[in-house]
Image (cartoon, grey):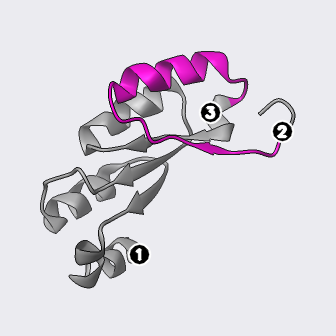
């Protein structure tokens, strides 16, 4: 990332997500702007923001909550949030509801 200052890293940590994000944040200069962490549970959002990341992606393939629950959380998040979701959630209308938030 030092050789390419315009590079952006999107994480996909499979275990100990918060620990890994803390380490990434402490090692990569400007990680708050150059790293976009994925979270797999909405409960991680506040802590990831506290670490210092500006943008976050909520990834729903591991999240068992309902679409209504997803919308509840998204309406309460502060800051930039992207969402990735399995095809069945998009087909069932979640993508259009997220877009309208």
The quadrant of the rendering that contains the C terminus is bottom left
Give left or right: position of 5 versus 59: right
Of the numbered discs in the image, which one, if any, rests on residue 99?
A: 1
Q: Is residue 70 above or below residue 93?
A: above
Task: Measure the C-alpha gap from mark 3 to mark 2.
Answer: 13 Å
Give left or right: position of 82 versus 14: right
Q: Is residue 19 above or below residue 41?
A: above
Which mark is first along the chain, 1 or 2? Answer: 2
Of the numbered discs in the image, which one, if any, rests on residue 71?
A: none
For the point 52% across and 17% down, the residue is 23
For the point 54% across and 34% down, the residue is 53
Which mark is first along the chain, 2 or 3? Answer: 2
- Please rate how many residues cluster around mark 3, counting C-alpha atoms within 10 Å: few if below 14, some from 14 to 19, many from 20: some
- Please rate how many residues cluster around mark 1, counting C-alpha atoms within 10 Å: few if below 14, some from 14 to 19, many from 20: few
Front tag of 2 and 1 = 2
Q: Which residue bears the numbered disc 3?
A: 32
Task: Measure the C-alpha gap from mark 1 to mark 3.
Answer: 24 Å
Residue 93 percent coordinates (x, y): 25, 82
State yes or no: discs 2 and 1 in contact (Cβ < 8 Å).
Answer: no
Residue 83 percent coordinates (x, y): 40, 60
**Callout 3: helix, strand or loop?**
helix
Q: Which of the 4 image quadrants contains residue 66?
A: bottom left
Query: What is the tally of numbered marks visible in this picture?
Result: 3
**Callout 1: helix, strand or loop?**
helix
Q: Which residue bears the numbered disc 2?
A: 5
Residue 12 percent coordinates (x, y): 45, 42
Q: Which of the 4 image quadrants contains residue 33?
A: top right
Q: In this picture, which residue range is highlighted in magenta?
A: 4-30
| Residue closer to the observer: 47 or 58 | 58
């Amino acid at each position: 990332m030092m050789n390419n200052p315009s590079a952006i890293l999107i994480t996909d940590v499979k275990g100990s997500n918060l620990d890994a994000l803390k380490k990434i944040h402490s090692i990569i200069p400007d990680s708050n702007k150059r790293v976009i962490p994925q979270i797999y549970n909405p409960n991680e959002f506040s802590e990831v923001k506290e670490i210092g990341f500006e943008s976050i992606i909520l990834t729903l393939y591991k999240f068992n909550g309902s679409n209504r629950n997803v919308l509840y959380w998204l309406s309460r998040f502060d800051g930039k949030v992207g969402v990735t979701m399995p095809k069945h959630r998009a087909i069932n209308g979640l993508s259009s509801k997220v877009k309208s938030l």
